[in-house]
Amino acid sequence: MKRVPIYRGELNQNIRDNFNMMKNFIKPGNFEMKKLLIIVIFMVVSMNGYSQSHTLDSLKEEIQRIDGKTNALDDRVLVNETDLGKLNKIKVSGYVQAQWENYGGDLEKTNGYNNTFYIRRARLKITYEALDGVKFVLQPDFSTGNLALKDAYAVLNIPKLKDFTIWAGQMNRPNYEVEYSSSQREVLERTRLIRAIYPGEREIGVKFEYKGSEIPLKFQLMAMNGNFTGAQAKDVDSKKDLMGRLLYSVKLPDAGIGIDFGVNGYFGGNLAKTNKYINTSKGTLDSLNGAWHYLDKKWKGCEIQIFADFLGGMAIKGEFISGVNSTVSTIASTATMAQMKADPNKLKNFSGYYFYFIKNIGQKNQFIARYDYYDPNTKLKGDAAGSDIFYKTWTLAWQYYLNASIRLSLNYEMPKNEINDTNKTNKKDNVVGLRIQAKF
Amino acid sequence: MKSIKIIPVMLIIALMAVAKGFSQAKITVKGSDTMVILAQKWAELYMKNNPSAMIQVTGGGSGVGITSLINGTTDICNSSRPMKQTELEKLKERYNTLGVQIPCAKDGITIFLNEANKVEEVTIKQLSDIYTGKIRNWKEVGGNDAGIRLYGRENSSGTYTYFHDEVVKADYVTSVQSLPGTAAVVNAVKKDVNGIGYGGAAYAVGVKQAKVKKDSDSKAFLPTAESIGKGEYPITRFLYMYLRSRPAGEMKKYIDWILSPEGQMVAVEAGYFPFK
């Protein structure tokens, strides 16, 4: 449905008016017609010898020919409109994040450089709304050296239940920080906790979602393979993982306050294929969990987001998650796919939380402070923790919205690690980031 | 991190925010084409009585207004439909506020017919069937044996969305001609014997208005002050103003005046209906 500069109805009406005028014009008894007939008869008799009836027939034929042409044009406009309507169902959006980062001394030793320019994300999101309630989404990421498919899913509205949708494909896991778009997030990276337990943010599976239009309730339930790291096309075991999230919203319009709060949980496991014994988080061997047994990957969490219309808007957001993860390394995201498949030999109790404070300063600026804590192995402390040390991280950021499309971000991340025999000092791993984001 | 003085930082931020708040002078209003006549009248009269105020009104459609509100390019968004949940979420993400919805007038979506059209009334179901292409000839709704020509609004229009959500409830048939503004719809129907269109009641000049009934057993109503006031006209809707934050200063004064009896009288004079 596109704007058409000429109103077809008006065009047709004009042609129809002309046609009617011509019809009236050639009616016997019409004065103009008589004059025309006399002229025509005179011309025909004296010059060409054509008959009156022959002329009328030609005139009618001509009108019919023009009418036919108009109808054909009409059909063509309809076809074009239909085609344009299809194009209108395709929406293309995206964003590019180019940034410069400066690293602390220990990161410099690891990386070999203390600063770099790079493209953090270069995304293109294509949404095709085939029908009412049927949507397809495709989102590749073109950042340098990292061409990857981020999203590829279909969303279907359950007929006659407008608040219910079914999602199928590769999509974000149902978690607040995961689903909060990178193009909108106020700090450059997600928290260490979320990066550790939801590596790559996406999963392949099916999601059922209820978003109440009458009741301010949101419920998400997702069944997924449970081992997605960005390149794993199929599952590595037969059991599927489940993830659920329930969120309730309270609005206090007179006070200008909105509170969203809820609970979430992950219920899954990893298959230990080759290890006979499993090294538990206590460092002991547990013969009950032998090879071809599933190791727990289960956690529960709660979240809150408070929005307040206070001097131009502010928000406080937080989440706490605790549970057990089966992995091969300190942080799940660093495990390779081969390791995940062959050797998930550790059960680790973990916990973490984060808080954001966001304050809008006028319409164009934002100040952000974030604190996050992540302990990958809560059962081991101090020297016994080895490399499973906890991190407490402060992040301060400032956003400047140049316009609706361009945003500049200054970000300072200051992680502080647990000190033990393995990590004798607080690592020099602070990161300063300066990013420009262009969004369309 | 202990060295970070959070309290002074917060104080500076608060001071900057307050300073920013005082710097507002011009009020921009953008959005609904249905409401543009009304918004202009409100602005003109308010500026006449308050020479220091500067209010700039533009149309573009409710969708355009909402996008502008989210993007920060308008202070007030006029919308002939409620904001969608997804739009409110975008506002929340960007400004950390819930947005403020202010119903400021009522409107009856009017069904425009050509004055030569024999049809007097239609049901909601018939309207849905007409705009989804199931009914294609006027004789199916008591008119002449002639094809129905459909006129409607562009998809950025709040009227388009409201009519879709509350009346059509399915995909519009592709033969609907999308026109930029209700005035254009009225103009097209005025010239087309077999045309039908929809739009705000204030624009119904030179065309016939069809009575609308909820279903075949209900009474049919025209969109009048009485039928809309009593909630009898089946396609009655609120017209809204949306803000990012609760109004303050000149903007609050302006909105309070719009909601006052004086402001509501302006709405009535312009062909709209008071919000309460």
Image (cartoon, coloured by chain):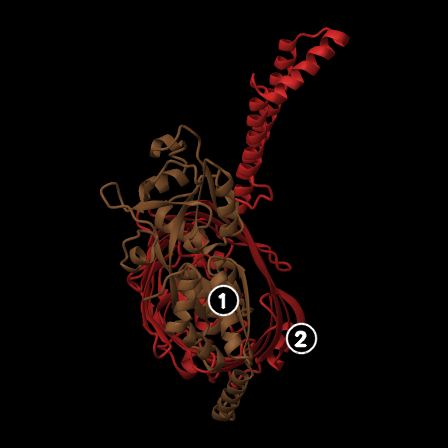
Chain colours: A red, B brown
Residue B41 position within the rendered picture, expressed as x and y whole percent measured from the top left = 49, 66
Q: Describe the element under mark 1 as helix, strand or loop.
A: helix
Q: Which is more foreground, mark 2 or mark 1? A: 1
Residue at x 49% of width, y 88% of height? B10
Q: Are marks 2 and 1 on the same chain?
A: no
Check disc 2 and give the amino acid type. Asn
Q: Is residue B169 visible?
A: no
Q: Which mark is residue B41?
A: 1
Residue B135 position within the rendered picture, expressed as x and y whole percent measured from the top left = 38, 34
Q: Which mark is residue A115?
A: 2
Residue at x 67% of width, y 7% of height? A51
Residue A217 position within the rendered picture, expressed as x and y whole percent measured from the top left = 30, 63
Q: CA distance from mark 2 to mark 1?
A: 58 Å
Q: Is residue A338 above or below residue B92?
A: above
Residue A409 position within the rendered picture, expressed as x and y whole percent measured from the top left = 59, 74
Q: Residues within 10 Å of mark 1 (few under 14, many from 20)?
A: some
Q: Nearer the viewer, residue A268 or B34?
A: B34
Q: Is residue A86 left or right of residue A327?
A: right
* Res A83 → quadrant: top right
Q: Which mark is residue B116?
A: none
Q: Nearer the viewer, residue B20 or A124?
A: B20
